[in-house]
């Protein structure tokens, strides 16, 4: 189960990084991975990404318990 949680957390981070880097049409070619890493210094963004990760973890544990 821990492996599934880690895998889904990495999927959440990857999806979030791709949406940050490629969904902004104005800066699409100019944003780099360093810009995304620098975004983690923002407390509001950090709270947002942690909330997404906790929701995914909760759902993984819930489905693991229900469909074991």
Image (cartoon, rainbow, N blue to C red):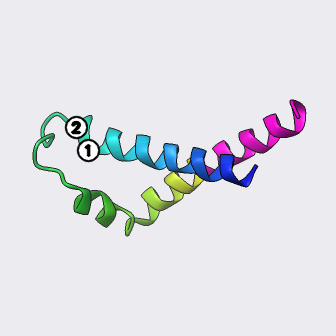
In the image, is 34 to the left or to the right of 60?
A: left
Percent x, y for residue 26?
A: 12, 38
Mark 2 crowd level (few <14, some 14–19, many ≥20, 10 Å Cα): few
Q: Quadrant of the rendered structure where residue 2 is?
A: bottom right
Magenta range: 53-68
- Is residue 48 depicted above or below 43 in this figure? above
Residue tagged 2: 24
**Which residue sits furthest top?**
67
> Horizontally, is 34 left or right of 4 in the view?
left
Q: Quadrant of residue 38?
A: bottom left
**Residue at disc 2, secondary structure:** loop
Q: Is residue 55 covered in magenta?
A: yes
Most extreme residue toward the front is: 3
Disc 1 designates what residue?
A: 21
Q: Position of residue 57 (x, y in %)?
A: 69, 48
* Contact (Cβ within 8 Å) of mark 2 with mark 1: yes
Q: Which of the two residues, 39 or 15, is positioned nearer the viewer here?
A: 15
Identify the disc placed on residue 30.
none
Residue sitting at 67 percent across and 52 percent down? 3
56 relative to 17 in the view: left or right: right
């Amino acid at each position: 189960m821990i492996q599934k949680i880690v895998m889904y957390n990495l999927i959440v981070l990857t999806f979030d990084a791709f949406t940050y880097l490629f969904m902004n049409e104005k800066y699409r070619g100019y944003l780099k991975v360093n810009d995304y890493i620098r975004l983690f210094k923002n407390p509001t963004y950090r709270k947002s990404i942690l909330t997404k990760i906790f929701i995914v973890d909760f759902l993984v544990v819930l489905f693991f318990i229900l469909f074991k």
